[in-house]
Amino acid sequence: MEWADARIWTAIQKLGLTEPDEKLHQLLFHSHFTQQAFLQVWEKKEFRMRKVEEFETTEEIRSTAVEFYPAARRLINSTDEPSLHSEIVVPWAKYFARRSETGPAKTTLGETLVQVAMHTQYHRAQINTRIRELGGEPPLVDYIAWLWLDRPEPAW
């Protein structure tokens, strides 16, 4: 996941944008804020909602991405198997409850780890589409490519 995000950011930097692209800015913010939000939940910190307006430049958003990965690695490396099955209360689940008939069911740490990876991949595809729309070359960020490249380290 980190390797793929780093490749996305390299492609964005290659665009050489002189003005932030609003659509790209929104997508990047949402993707990386979501990572940070789940990290707050996993670390049992007080959830702090952020707004895209707090980030004037895409570089400010990039720094949140770079900060996420060491903290996430520490958490994952210190998590044992039983902890993966522990319930995690996600503060924004109440918004889902408003849109569903049953509300959110129990969610575990392991399930939310998978959610973050899948959610990030989903938005990474949207970001790649925007990179192409802006005249750039979207990087290959498939998990299988990372495996076939012998699991390279991210290049921030």
Image (spheres, rainbow, N blue to C red):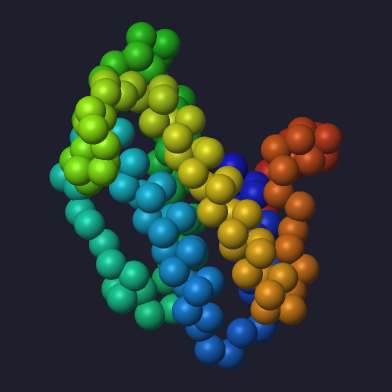
Counting every numbered tag in the picture gives: 0
Res 42 quadrant in image: top left
In this image, 126 relative to 23: left or right? right
x and y percent of residue 41 in the render?
A: 26, 38
Residue at 72% x, 43% y: name it: 142
Rendered image quadrant of residue 126:
bottom right
Q: Residue at 48% x, 64% y: name it.
A: 27
| Nearer the observer, 6 or 20 | 20
| Residue 130 vertical placement versus 38 (above, below) | below
* Quadrant assignment for the C terminus: bottom right
Residue 147: image location, x then y, percent: 77, 33
Asked if residue 93 is positioned above or below residue 138 in the image, the reply reads above
Q: Residue at x 29, y 16 (%)?
A: 86
Left or right: 17, with 96 as reference point:
right
Q: Is residue 107 above or below residue 31?
A: above
- Please state the horizontal and vertical placement of residue 122, each as a whole percent of the image: 56, 48
Seen as rendered, the residue at the extreme top is 82
